[in-house]
């Protein structure tokens, strides 16, 4: 007969965080709340929330980058339009799968900062300085799977 030692979750967390998660889920399902490693559980939940928020912010920034390239980088549009368009479609699919009311509100509150970061990237990539100083797109337009901006023809 094998004796199974009681797992010290705090030690397990330091050794194998995936196994720690499995043990924590097991304890939660069995309603053994007194056995939980609450300090690390709280930290993991906070990290999970931050990671999800970072993911939707990053996806929105990618959408903005590609829409700006589509709309303003005239010299590369013919060669790259299909790629940029497909990237926007992919990023929108990913962000809309993750979207919640809280994330929508967060993105709306931070759209200007997200736009400035996207603008800085496309300026460096294209070597152009023709991008609007303020975000020319609404959050609803950015998330709308069928919406694309009109194309500038500055050439």
Image (cartoon, rainbow, N blue to C red):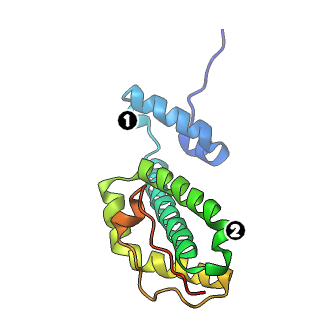
Horizontal relation, residue 5 to residue 67: left or right? right
Q: Extreme right residue here?
A: 79
- Where disc 1 sits, the SS reads helix
Label 2: few (<14), some (14–19) or many (≥20) C-alpha neighbours in 10 Å? few
Horizontal relation, residue 142 to residue 72: left or right? left
Q: Which residue is mark 2?
A: 79
Q: Quadrant of residue 111?
A: bottom left
Pick whichever, 80 or 61, lies toward us.
80
State which tag comes first along the sequence, 1 or 2: 1
> Separation of disc 1 and disc 2 at Cα?
58 Å
Label 1: few (<14), some (14–19) or many (≥20) C-alpha neighbours in 10 Å? few
Q: Position of residue 11 (x, y in %)?
A: 60, 44
Q: Quadrant of residue 130?
A: bottom right
Q: Position of residue 151 (x, y in %)?
A: 50, 75
Q: Which residue is mark 1?
A: 33
- Location of residue 128 with respect to 1 vertically, above or below: below
């Amino acid at each position: 007969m094998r004796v199974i030692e009681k797992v010290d979750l705090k030690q397990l967390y330091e050794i194998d965080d995936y196994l720690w998660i499995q043990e924590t889920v097991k304890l939660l399902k069995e309603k053994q709340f007194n056995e939980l490693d609450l300090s690390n559980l709280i930290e993991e939940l906070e990290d999970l929330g931050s990671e999800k928020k970072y993911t939707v912010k990053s996806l929105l920034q990618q959408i903005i980058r590609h829409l700006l390239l589509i709309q303003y980088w005239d010299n590369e549009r013919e060669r790259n339009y299909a790629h940029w368009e497909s990237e926007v479609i992919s990023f929108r699919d990913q962000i809309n799968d993750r979207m919640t009311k809280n994330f929508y509100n967060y993105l709306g509150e931070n759209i200007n900062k997200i736009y400035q970061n996207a603008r800085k990237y496309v300026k460096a990539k294209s070597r152009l300085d023709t991008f609007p100083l303020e975000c020319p797109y609404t959050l609803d337009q950015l998330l709308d799977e069928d919406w694309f901006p009109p194309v500038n023809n500055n050439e």
